[in-house]
Amino acid sequence: MEFFINQNSNLPPLKMELVNDGRNDFRKFFEKIQNATIKFSMYDVKNNVKIIANSPAEIELKCESCGIGGDEPEYYITYKWRDRDTKKVGKFNGEFIIEFLDGSGTLIAPIRDKLFINVLEV
């Protein structure tokens, strides 16, 4: 996944959709993620230096009508940029660390693909 943002910008927020792969009980996962601590970290791909370390992230309902009428609610994991987060131009690797508060463990997302963040010079 590729995400692009201008240097010294804090918009748009980073949003990563939680995807139902059909292998797990997704309803249970959505319930668990609502009782979790979510952090975001970002590393420079060239030298692996951490630019953002364990900064708070959130979950956001994908749409207002999600979950109404029997549909499963869908969520994004989101990170709201601070001005200092995008000071340096370059390509970065991002990850969300989800710690489930029920003691069932920690998940680092994305799982399969890498999340690349491109900070563009303006």
Image (tube, rainbow, N blue to C red):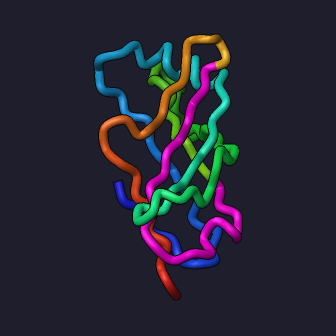
Which of 58/61 is in front?
58
Q: Residue at the front extreme?
A: 47
Q: Is residue 38 left or right of residue 15?
A: right
Name the residue at 42% across, 19% down.
26
Q: Residue drawn at (56%, 12%), measured in percent from left and top?
A: 104
Q: Is residue 95 magenta?
A: yes
Confirm whether the magenta stretch covers residue 89: yes
> 20 above or below 45?
above
Residue shown at the point (37%, 35%) measured from the top left: 111
Residue 101 in the image: x percent, y percent?
67, 18
Q: Where 2 falls versus 89 (above or below)?
A: above
How many numbered marks have been drawn onto this rendered protein structure?
0
Q: Is residue 2 left or right of residue 43?
A: left
Residue segment shown in magenta? 80-100
Q: Position of residue 38 (x, y in %)?
A: 63, 35
Residue at image coords 62%, 11%: 103
Residue 110 placement: quadrant: top left
Q: How far from the left and from the top, in percent, is residue 98?
A: 57, 31
Above or below: residue 11 compared with residue 76: below
Vertical relation: 11 (above or below) 42:
below
Horizontally, residue 70 falls left or right of residue 40, namely left
Residue 95 location (% of width, % of height): 49, 45
